[in-house]
Amino acid sequence: MIEHRAALARWRRLDVVIRDLPLGLLLLAGSFLPVLQGHGTQVGGVPDRPFDALAVLVVAVESLPLAVRRRWPAVSLTLVALGFAVDQLLGYHTVAAAGLGFALVSAGAHLERLRRTTVAVLSVAYAVLAIALSRLGSEPISEFVTFYLLLAFAWGIGAWLRRTRAAEARHRRRVAEDTRAAERTTIARELHDVVTHHVTAMVVQAEAARYLTAAPERLDQTLTAITDTGRRAITDLRHLLDLLNPDHGTEVGRPSPGGLLSLVEQARQAGQPVEFTEDGTPAESAGSADLVAYRVVQESLTNALKHARGSRTSVEVHHGDREIAVAVSTNGAASASPGGSGRGLAGLRERVAVLGGDFRAGHDGGGFAVRARIPTGNPT
């Protein structure tokens, strides 16, 4: 099986002319087999004529141009049609005359320009050939009409193949464009989550440092927290930029080292009182659920820092057998619109929905709550 696939791959790498030549050679050789002579295509009823030197040239013109039927379809069709006309007028009736059908299919499939003109010229040429054959032979007009319909059918097959190929190409382009758009959206959301969270924490910490000039120890701790936050931001951004490398893996985004606890500690360093509870054992095959849960907590804590700084915030994460449940609530005047650009809570809602989970965010009593149920086991 492997050798067969390798041979097929080598064959496909050959030039198209070399791949199309065997058909022409087959028709050329078959025309000189005694058992097949006189049994080829016959239109017009012209009496059979024995093979002679001219027959060799006619057979060659009917068959060998099929080697270029995909590279130069107009040239191939013209030569094959000319050989076919001479074949029928002189009464050779060779097997190579069947090459006209192959040339028509290939021209219908691969001819790019002057397609209607080609059809019109061929129709006129066939009408002239039919008149000439009717004077030399004995077949009724209906036979010529039937053969013309067969030729039109061969062209129609080629045209259908061309339309099918074009439709497949358009579909591949749409899939590629949709894939690129999805990748850009995913990376944009990751950048939003990383940049917004870290920068918000740094801004809050920097504002707090302004009032700690009289307490050097606390000021030093705050500046150290700002430095650590900046380093984490650089690490996360470097990871996202690595994703743009074609040699990088396909996984977009991952929780930062330290996981959820590092998010909580960072929020606490920024002055947000956070109560953190995590129970259950994380599933070994959680898939992308871990990352989505991480982003839910990250976005929720970012909103708490922005809209309810200093208010008590509770983070509860439960790892179940089939899902991860996340609940983040903040007391005070917390507010965050579930709508927006699609990269905040709305983006989280889409992420959770893709995994088949449930996401809710809104005012809860005197504060704001975010709750998510994220099924595990879905691939990233």
Image (spheres, helix red, strand yellow):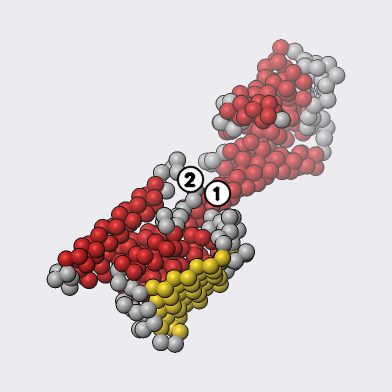
Residue 102: percent from left, percent from top: 69, 33
Q: Residue placed farthest to the bottom in the image?
A: 365
Residue 112: percent from left, percent from top: 54, 40
Residue at coordinates 44% horizontally, 87% vertically from top-left? 365
Q: Residue placed farthest to the top in the image?
A: 53
For the residue marked with disc 1, what is the amino acid? Arg
Q: Which numbered tag is attached to residue 172?
A: 1
Tag 1–tag 2 contact (CB < 8 Å)? no
Residue at coordinates 80% horizontally, 39% vertically from top-left? 143
SS assignment at label 1: helix
Residue at coordinates 76% horizontally, 39% vertically from top-left? 147
Structural distance between the alpha carbons of marks 1 and 2: 22 Å
Q: Residue placed farthest to the left in the image?
A: 214
For the residue marked with disc 2, what is the amino acid? Gly
Asked whether, in this view, residue 259 is left or right of residue 17, the answer is left
SS assignment at label 2: loop
Q: Can residue 237 be seen in this view?
A: no
Q: Is residue 164 visible?
A: yes
Residue 334: percent from left, percent from top: 37, 80
Mark positioned earlier in the residue sequence (1 or 2): 1
Closer to the eye: label 1 or 2 = 2
Residue 77's quadrant in the figure? top right
Residue bearing the label numbered 2: 249
